[in-house]
Amino acid sequence: MIFVTGGAGYIGSHACVELLMAGHDVTVFDNFSNSQWEATERVQRIAGRTMTVVRGDIRDVQALQSALRASKAEAVMHFAGLKAVGESEAEPLKYYDNNVLGTLRLLEAMVACDVKTLVFSSSATVYGIPESLPYREDHRLSATNTYGMTKLVVENMLRDLHRSDPSWSIGILRYFNPVGAHSSGLIGEDPQGTPNNLMPYVAQVAVGRREFLNVWGNDYPTPDGTGVRDYIHVVDLAIGHVKAFDYLKTREGCIAVNLGAGSGHSVMDMVRSFEAASGRAVPFKVGPRRAGDLGAYWADASLAAELFGWRVERGLDRMCADTWRWQSMNPDGYKGEQ
Ligand code: NAD
Ligand code: WQD
């Protein structure tokens, strides 16, 4: 049994599908602060198997401990957290409370229930300003915003915990830019309000919910001047979690591993691919750079290949085609269902 915090969210829901399909039993623990119950129903529909879903907050010690104990979990995958960089700058305490205190409570509950295998959702943001590219796992760590700092604090907490008790098996997975959706079109990213990230914004322009895309800067030292990122299909990312668990279950340790494609694409690459996949125009206007943005970064993805036998299989075309299927089948996200 795998206990999945944040399993109703964008990445967690895709991970639940892959875990169920790989034969694992799953308990989701989510407070639905940024997700809908419907997502968990659809996960079970896709996988053709049931899972347990518990509504609860990881900071609620009693609810968390009783759910973890009842699940008889052998491992935890910890996706629950807040992820909006701009909001984290405006409301830092909310981010420390949810992401840092929430993880502390989760680790205490794991100790109490003697569960010592953990997969944690970290982010490429912990590398800060690139000293060299691609980012390797041994790149210096730093944070340029509060969200990134919460990930860095948790990473340090996990390394300290493992040093104190080497019988833990901890996988810190540093995601690059997750995009795309399940090929069924039943689950995908469902941002509330105006999307912060490129792909959901492009999708909403294509479907007619927004007039045009703001391209934030075309004067970066990149081939076409727009920002370059390492986009990774969310299903590849989800499969990476199943493989990471397979690796961790027989080994003690605390390892940090990049999950990325290992190559970069620009904002204009994304716009053109999305137009081709959707057959719709994506009008855009070039504006100034977004504060805090880096010009370009991408992963060295070789450690995940070496340790987990994992590499991405879905390119930009699939990322755009699957996002478009999800967006056009669910123009108002999961809310259209209610
Ligand atoms: P998401 O917001 O879609 O999913 C997070 C889930 O956690 C939601 O279902 C939310 O309701 C739940 N949650 C939040 N706080 C909770 C709490 N206190 N108790 C219980 N449940 C809680 O986000 P996502 O994109 O699926 O991201 C999952 C994880 O991956 C996050 O930790 C995020 O920081 C990390 N991450 C995301 C990205 C990205 O670009 N999406 C990149 C790198 C890392
Ligand atoms: C991608 C590119 C923008 C929107 C963020 C977090 C990071 C991680 C992933 C969680 C950039 C450009 C974007 C738009 C644009 N999350 N852009 N117009 O900033 O690389 O990463 O999400 O861990 O921590 O910082 O992703 O999708 O916002 O931007 O031109 O409307 O698209 O400038 O070059 P980012 P993004």
Image: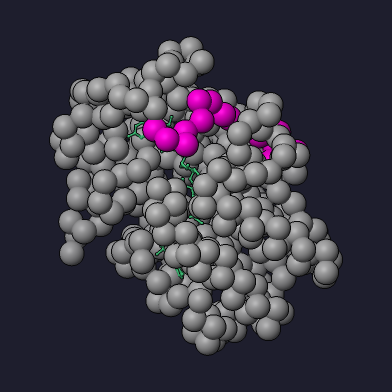
User: Magenta part of the protein: which range?
Assistant: 290-306
Say whether residue 257 is visible.
Answer: yes
Of residues 25 and 86, which is closer to you in this image?
Answer: 86
- Is 108 above or below relative to 88? below
Q: Position of residue 231 (x, y in %)?
A: 49, 33
Q: Position of residue 168 (x, y in %)?
A: 77, 66
Direction top: furthest residue: 223
Name which residue lies at 39% across and 33% down: 290
Viewport quadrant of the N terminus: bottom right
Name which residue lies at 57% across and 79% down: 68
Number of marks drawn:
0
Q: Position of residue 311 (x, y in %)?
A: 62, 36
Left of 107 or right of it: where is 294? left
Viewport quadrant of the C terminus: bottom left
322 part of magenta stretch? no
Of residues 147 and 70, which is closer to you in this image?
Answer: 147
Quadrant of residue 49 within the rendered picture? bottom left
Name which residue lies at 26% across and 29% down: 213
Q: Position of residue 281 (x, y in %)?
A: 20, 23
- Is 162 above or below relative to 191? below
Query: Ligand 2 is in which quadrant of the figure?
Result: top left
